Amino acid sequence: MYFILIGKYQKIIFIISRSICYFNLNNFSNALSDAQNCIKFKNDFAKGYQRQGAAYFKLNKTWDALCSYSIAFLYDPNSEPIKTE
């Protein structure tokens, strides 16, 4: 069981890192897809919602971005990146 959890955590880190790479390459639809996959693996992952919000914002889906940022803030209210985005 321990190894399964480590594998799951590593996969989430890989996917969220790839999401950031896509975002920095202006590939916002793939950044969004990866952020959503992270949320599927761990639905209380604030960084996943933060990345999802950033991608939605760049895709001109401001309502979805606001909802994503709000959820991220609920899970991690002390996160400076979430507060400033």
Image: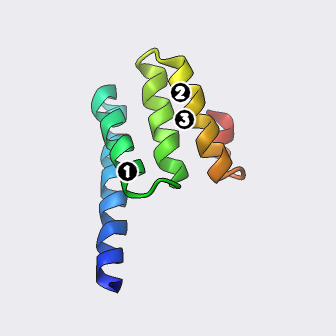
Q: Residue at x 34, y 27 (%)?
A: 28
Callout 3 amino acid: Ser
- Check whether the beta carbons of the residues at disc 2 and disc 3 lie within 8 A of each other: yes
The residue pinned by badge 3 equals 68
Q: Is residue 40 above or below residue 20?
A: below
**Amino acid under label 2?**
Ala
Residue 78, image x, y percentages? 72, 52
Q: CA distance from mark 3 to mark 1?
A: 14 Å
Q: Alpha carbon of mark 2 to alpha carbon of mark 3: how far?
A: 5 Å
Q: Quadrant of the C terminus?
A: top right
Instruction: Please give left or right for residue 79 compared with residue 47 in the image.
Output: right
| Picture layout, residue 83 above or below residue 57 | below
Marker disc for residue 40? 1
Q: Amino acid at mark 1?
A: Lys
- Mark 3: few, some, or many residues within 10 Å (few <14, many ≥20)? many
Could you say whether the residue bearing mark 2 is in a helix, strand or loop? helix
Residue 9: which quarter of the image?
bottom left
Residue, disc 2: 65
